[in-house]
């Protein structure tokens, strides 16, 4: 598994991570602790060390399942870079309330630490809030104190818009060392402004939704239907049709023969010099192995600006 520096945080992260929104139950499947343990055991076996979660993937449910794994003894806390987020509270399927006041965020942090069964969070990320919510000196003062107390190792920003230059440009000012952004072959907007800002500031970049909500997995054809408990169920029918036709064309014109589309799509993201790691979701150990295989494709160069000399 290739490893890169997460910008100026200095954290060495695997180029393939584990996204865990699905553990909260909003992607058409409810996970048992045993299923999560099997997924994370497989991740460790293939050299993945980055887990990305959030306070509102369920009511800290995703974090609790990760915490249950950490408590199982299958691996040590030091084996993992754990990133989570703050700012929202799960109130129901695809429903959230906003929680941005410093005292609310402090409670979220304590609840996340409890759920994850850990004393510290490696990367604590502002979670898709507005610029008004972001521009709150009291919030960042509180977070800086938690960094000084050792409960947070590094701060990050998960921008809600893939073109939010205001928050990206302010990262250094607020003490954040990494940006999380939607980036994939179907959505290249960050290339226009966000990535340039990240490179100027030496910010690590986590590319979320690298498989475009599964559309770039290669599993779905035009006309595909999704269950009502799947987040994609809410996507406009015309949008789904247009996207899947585009994916068919990409498969014909860009994906090399014999290479699974999902692996190619992850590697495609990782070829950009600003991108540190991709964080695809996965529902099984088999998907973990498939995702990890993307790191071996030629698109993922060892000469990447953030590559770590000693590979794992």
Image (tube, helix red, strand yellow):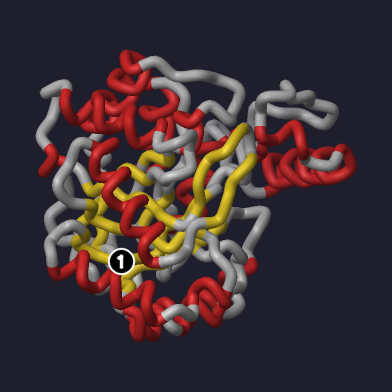
Q: Nearer the viewer, residue 130 or 110?
A: 110
* Quadrant, the C terminus: top left
Task: Give x and y (percent) for residue 245.
Answer: 81, 41
* Quadrant, the N terminus: top left
Task: Give x and y (percent) for residue 186.
Answer: 67, 54
Q: Nearer the viewer, residue 12 or 233?
A: 233
Instruction: Identify the residue at image location x=42%, y=45%.
Output: 55
Q: Nearer the viewer, residue 274 or 28?
A: 28
The answer to which image quadrant residue 284 occupies is top left
Position above or below: 50 against 101: above
Q: Residue furthest right?
A: 238
Task: Give x and y (percent) for residue 215.
Answer: 66, 38
Question: In the picture provided, is 1 more to the left or to the right than 85?
Answer: left
Position above or below: 70 against 118: above
Task: Give x and y (percent) for residue 93.
Answer: 62, 32
Instruction: Identify the residue at image location x=32%, y=51%.
Output: 83
The answer to which image quadrant residue 306 occupies is bottom left
**Count of marks placed on residues:** 1
> Quick check: can you spot residue 310?
yes
Which residue does the numbered mark 1 point to in the structure image?
155
**SS for callout 1:** strand
> Badge 1 local density, few (<14 within 10 Å), some, or many (20+)?
many
Question: In the picture provided, is 105 more to the left or to the right than 97?
Answer: left
Position above or below: 48 against 188: above
Q: Residue furthest front?
A: 103
> Quick check: can you spot residue 50?
no
Instruction: Identify the residue at image location x=46%, y=83%.
Output: 169
């Amino acid at each position: 598994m290739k490893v890169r520096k997460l910008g100026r945080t200095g954290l060495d992260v695997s180029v393939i991570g584990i996204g865990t929104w699905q553990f909260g139950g909003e992607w058409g499947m409810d996970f048992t602790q045993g299923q999560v343990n099997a997924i994370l055991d497989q991740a460790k076996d293939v050299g993945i060390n980055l887990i990305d979660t959030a306070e509102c993937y369920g009511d800290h449910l995703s974090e609790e399942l990760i915490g249950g794994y950490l408590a199982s003894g299958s691996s040590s806390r030091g084996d993992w870079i754990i990133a989570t987020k703050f700012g929202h509270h799960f109130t129901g399927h695809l429903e959230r309330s906003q929680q941005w006041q410093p005292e609310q965020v402090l409670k979220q942090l304590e609840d996340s630490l409890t759920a994850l069964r850990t004393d510290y969070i490696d990367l604590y990320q502002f979670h898709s809030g507005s610029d008004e919510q972001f521009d709150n000196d009291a919030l960042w003062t509180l977070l800086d104190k938690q960094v000084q107390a050792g409960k947070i190792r590094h701060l990050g920003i998960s921008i809600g818009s893939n073109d939010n230059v205001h928050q990206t440009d302010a990262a250094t000012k607020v003490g954040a060392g990494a940006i999380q952004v939607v980036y994939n072959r179907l959505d290249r907007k960050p290339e226009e402004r966000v990535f340039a800002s990240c490179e100027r500031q030496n910010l690590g970049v986590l590319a979320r939704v690298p498989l475009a909500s599964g559309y770039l997995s290669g599993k779905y054809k035009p006309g595909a239907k999704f269950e009502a408990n799947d987040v994609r169920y809410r996507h406009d029918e015309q949008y789904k049709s247009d996207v899947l036709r585009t994916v068919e064309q990409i498969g014909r014109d860009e994906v090399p023969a014999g290479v699974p589309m999902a692996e190619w799509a992850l590697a495609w993201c990782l070829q950009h010099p600003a991108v540190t790691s991709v964080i695809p979701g996965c529902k099984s150990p088999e998907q973990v192995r498939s995702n990890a295989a993307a790191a071996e494709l030629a698109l993922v160069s060892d000469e990447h600006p953030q590559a770590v000399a000693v590979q794992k």
